[in-house]
Image (spheres, grey):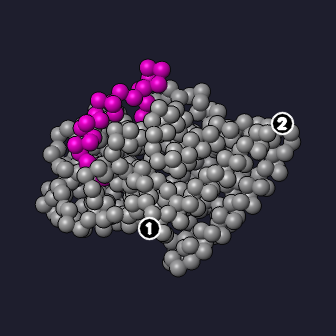
Amino acid sequence: MLRVLIHLLAIVQLVNRYLSATFRASGRGRGDETIDDYEPTLTVVIPVFNEADAIQDTLRSVLASDYPREKLRVVCFDDGSSDDSHQRARAVAVDDDRLSVVHSPVNVGKRLAINRVVREVDSELIVSVDSDVLVEPGAIRQLVRRFARPSIAAVGGWVDVRNKHDNWITRMQVLKYWYAYFVAKNLEKSFHHVMAVSACLAAYRRSVLLELMPILEERAVLGVPIKYGEDRFLTRQIVKAGYHTTSTLEARCRTFVPATLAEYFNQQLRWRRAHIIDYLGGCSHVWKLTPLVAISYFGAASLLVLYPIGMFGALVAGRLLQVVMVHAAFLGAYGLYYRWRVRSWPAHERVSALSYVPHAVCMPISNGLMTVLALFTLDSSSWETRR
């Protein structure tokens, strides 16, 4: 019975995602609205914590953005780094007066760092950029173009993989990221209710961030302040407050992904915690959204819980290898679809169709074991992927 339920939920998720493509192709839903005569002042906030090797490239890529110089300000918030991130950021600031570097003696976390800057600036929009990404020159302008209506409060970009060809682990994640942005978000974009806007590259209305500030600064589990899942939490609070969120593939940034299994599974553990907290919090209001979006959201929440149970049952019954083989078959098909879609891309931008197959072995650990571990470590305040 459990196997049937898991299969049904998986089918619901797939159907929802294919329906989304139909919605966009047929013009139903709101789609990708744009406006070209909107050029507000904006502040790009880049919190940095021990990213000395990457921070200068990130800052220079933002400063090279195709946006009016007089309307662009950049603030790099050094969040208690123990390396020389602060000094390297200041070296870039010497050559460009649009960049300010702020130092915090203690680590407060990405969201609190952004909040501090939001209070101090007067820009209309706040753009969040992670400290290890490269932002394409036209990305910020493309984010701004999506604020086509006053109700839109957040716009996310496309987070691509920067170290695609390091090894099989990074190649596997290329497909995970591609599906996350080219398939999984389509339905939510059609109704302007994207439920997870990644702060790797995202733009927000400052007025909305100020409105939600008291909620954003009071996150805790069992009395312990938590720093994980801040992007998802912020997005859900924006939607809960009645605003719209969307994303665009025309605003691209590139980020480093874990290149070792230890880093990858640590990242997945943090993400599982974020998913559990997010889905629990969403129970009170997501059901009020468009039915297709709500079904997709709660379907994913149900799979998060049922998948580990199903894996445990397969292990006890001696069917784990069979399950892995089924996973591999589906992931191989996903890989073929990915390669067909990116067939015109340059060779260095794409990976093999077989790159997704190893996820069949990783998935029982990342989606199964890590979910259980996450459930018992929800009060963790650590940031596992930081070196």
Q: Looking at the figure, which quarter contains the N terminus?
A: top right
Q: Residue at x 58, y 33 (%)?
A: 374
Q: Residue at x 45, y 36 (%)?
A: 285
Q: Which residue is mark 2?
A: 316
List x then y, in percent, for residue 193.
42, 50
Which amino acid type is marked by label 1? Answer: Gly
Q: Which residue is mark 1?
A: 27
List x then y, in percent, for residue 66.
24, 68
Please say whether residue 117 is visible from this viewpoint.
Answer: no
Q: Say if the magenta span includes residue 205.
A: yes
**The magenta segment:** 200-227
Which residue is nearer to you in this view: 39 or 115? 39
Disc 1 or 2, which lies upstream in sequence?
1
Mark 1 against mark 2, which lies toward the viewer?
1
Which amino acid type is marked by label 2? Answer: Val
Q: Secondary structure at mark 2?
A: helix
Cα separation, mark 1 vs mark 2, equals: 48 Å
List x then y, in percent, for residue 114.
29, 41
